Image (cartoon, rainbow, N blue to C red):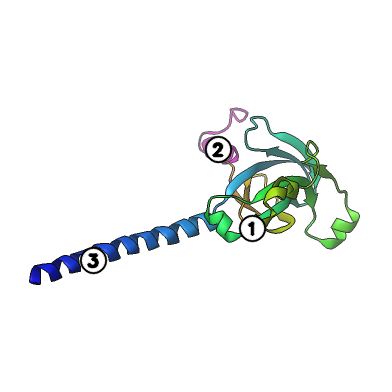
Amino acid sequence: MRIRVVRISLFAIVLLSVALALSIFGIVLTYTRLTDEVPVAEVTFEQTGSEEFNAYLRLPGEDIPRKYVIYGDQFRVDAQFVKLKPWVNILGMDARYRLDRLEGRFSQIEQQNSGPHRAYDLASKYSGSVSAWLVPWNFLVDAEYGSSTYTDISTDDVYTVYRSHFGLLVRSNPNAAAGKNSKAGVINGMFNWLFGSEKAQ
């Protein structure tokens, strides 16, 4: 009788352990899927004038960035966006998007209304709406809308635009090339200060 009780107890412990492990796995999977982010564009800037920049935009799979002239102290990327239902995301399907537009913008309303402005079509080779891709599966769709993200421009940063399950977002990181040039400039400046420049000699 005692052996039987021990066996039942061990079986119950194993069963509970498996259930706990599956629960933890489910929680981690759900969190991972619902917070999934995928880079969809990388942008760097070169200043050419007062609030005028060359924007270099590179899309996934492209080795050579596209060049655009934009005006303002900020930039914005727009996209058509189709949000899927959360349970569809958890099962492995991702939100659908199509990048539509790149443009500069001014943080001040007065400048936005009176300053130069230029926008570029990023979806010229496509036709129709992104939602048309999911017409046979429209029961999976939660909402269709335009998603936009914008931020201040710095020539010292590299901007990465991400697709989440809810829309676009942008993050910046220091530009490695700019950082190297900056460090080189500081080192050369210290060297010239300590030992004198060639011109001084």
Crowding at dot 1, Cα within 10 Å, few <14 / some 14-19 / many 20+, comes out as: some
Query: Mark 1 against mark 2, which lies toward the viewer?
Result: 1
Q: Position of residue 161 (x, y in %)?
A: 64, 48
Q: Residue at x 55, y 33 (%)?
A: 196
Closer-to-camera residue (76/185): 76
**Magenta segment boundaries in residue numbering:** 176-201
| Residue 22, above or below 178 | below
For the stretch drawn in magenta, the main secondary structure is helix
Report crowding for label 2: few under 14, some 14 to 19, many 20 or more residues within 10 A (C-alpha): few
Q: CA distance from mark 3 to mark 1?
A: 40 Å
Which residue was labeled with disc 1?
Answer: 166
State whether residue 132 is above or below residue 147.
above
What type is the residue that disc 1 sits on? Answer: Phe
Q: Which mark is residue 13?
A: 3
- 2 or 3: mark nearer the eye: 3
Label 1: element kind: loop
Q: Position of residue 160 (x, y in %)?
A: 62, 46
**Which one is nearer the viewer's eye here, 151 or 20?**
20
Give the number of marks: 3
Instruction: Identify the element where label 3 is drawn.
Output: helix
Mark number, residue 180: 2
